[in-house]
Image (cartoon, rainbow, N blue to C red):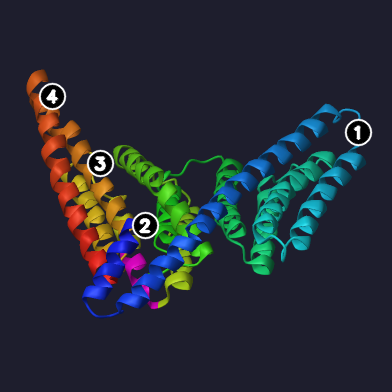
Amino acid sequence: MAEQLTRFVERWVDAGIVDAPTAARIRRFEAEHADSARWRWSTWVALAFGGLMLAAGVLLFVSAHWDEMSPAARLGLVLLMVTIFHAGGAMTTRTSPVTSTALHTMGTVVLGAGIYLAGQIFNLDEHWPAGLMLWALGAAIGWAVLGQWPQTVLLAILVPVWLSSEWHVLLMERAIWLPECIRASGELLLALTYFTAVRSGAPGASRRALVWLGGIALLPATAYLALSSSFLFVHGVHPEWPTDLLVIGWSVALGLPLLLAFVLRGSGAWTNLLATVWVTLATRLDAGGIAVFAWWALGATGLVAWGVSDTRRERINMGVVIFAVTVTAFYFSHVMDQLGRSASLVGLGLLSLVGGWVLERVRRQLVSQLQGGLA
């Protein structure tokens, strides 16, 4: 049985919350169901591997006979695959929900291939982001009908990819360049919205998947915003930039994540509004100045405080990581070049050891406080 649960049960017995026979029944129940929990994880791994092998086999078969098939046969084969996967998912809903989820996910993924294949067959390449829009629409329908977390993840990925593609095509058609910080701001705020989708308590599968997706995307999005903001500051604002595109770009980049945050967090979205203000100001700071590093450190501290407020450990960990990266970047840009080679290496070593120890100590204290509050 998990060591953490054992400590909790002993604490409950010492506090008089549960008696000894109840604690024994809890331990016995968890011991009996520990194998079933491991079995569920092994089942997920087996099904994911089986789904990948099935998809790879189908792709190899289709690619081997692709030149021999007519356009109608190609389209019919892809549509048949979509139908088979979703039909198989519907048939196994009651007998094996995990298998049903995997099959429905494969059906939605194959839908994208079918959309672009149809566009290739009928030469519908005039506006290629429309294919992403249709794919995202299919994922939205799958999410609305099935309510499964893989459909949520696909929808959360496809919608921003579609919007980013539309933005790219719009700029190409107008033959102009606009600063990347617009797109970078939207991506960072959207990743932050996913990452903070859970306010407190045990989340559902879909929200937990959003938290994972946001956590994976948050660090790359942070680096993207930092680099694009510095490029904007160096080159400045050009008067020939169209006002209408700037309004559209900033409205979507700032407004869409804030609207989604209101849907996910309700009245708690006021913290997302503060994050929107922080991101907007971050794009206006001197890329090489001390103020920008102080601003990023303040943002990392705010993320830690956000995690403490909502009792979410992952936000504390992520905030500590961003703070450490900010301090390290400040050392390389403002301190290291002022020292000799040996002194700079010694300073970097001391910064890593002492700073890492301090940050880890603070992180452990905050996480311990959260665990104590939850207990």
Quadrant of residue 341 in the image? top left
The outermost residue toward the top is 341
Which comes sooner in the sequence, label 2 or label 4? 2
In the rendered image, residue 82 lying in the magenta stretch gets the answer no
Give the number of the disc on residue 345: 4
Q: What residue type is disc 4 on? A: Leu
Q: Residue 69 carries which label?
A: 1
Q: Do the residues labelled 4 and 3 touch (CB within 8 Å)?
A: no
- Whether residue 313 appears in this view of the structure is yes
Give 29 or 367, whichever is nearer the viewer: 29
| Residue lying at 35% horizontally and 61% vertically, measured from the top left | 276
Q: Where does label 2 land, which residue? A: 2
| Element at label 1 | loop
Rendered image quadrant of residue 269: bottom left
Pair 2/3: label in front = 2
Work out how far the residue at label 4 is from the one at label 3, CA to CA, in angstroms. Answer: 17 Å
Indicate the secondary structure of the residue bearing disc 2: loop
Residues shaded magenta: 267-274
Are the two marked residues, 1 and 4, in contact with CB atoms closer than 8 angstroms?
no
Q: Is residue 351 left or right of residue 311?
A: left
Tell me if label 2 and label 3 are in contact, CB under 8 Å: no
Please provide percent x and percent y for residue 344: 11, 25
Q: Nearer the viewer, residue 117 or 354?
A: 354
Task: Say which quarter of the image contains residue 351.
Answer: top left
Which amino acid type corresponds to the residue marked 3 in the rendered image?
Val
- Mark 4 element type: helix
Label 2 amino acid? Ala
Report how far apart the C-alphas of labels 2 and 3 lie in the structure. Answer: 33 Å
Residue on which the image places disc 3: 325
Q: At 45% across and 53% down in the image, what residue appears?
A: 212
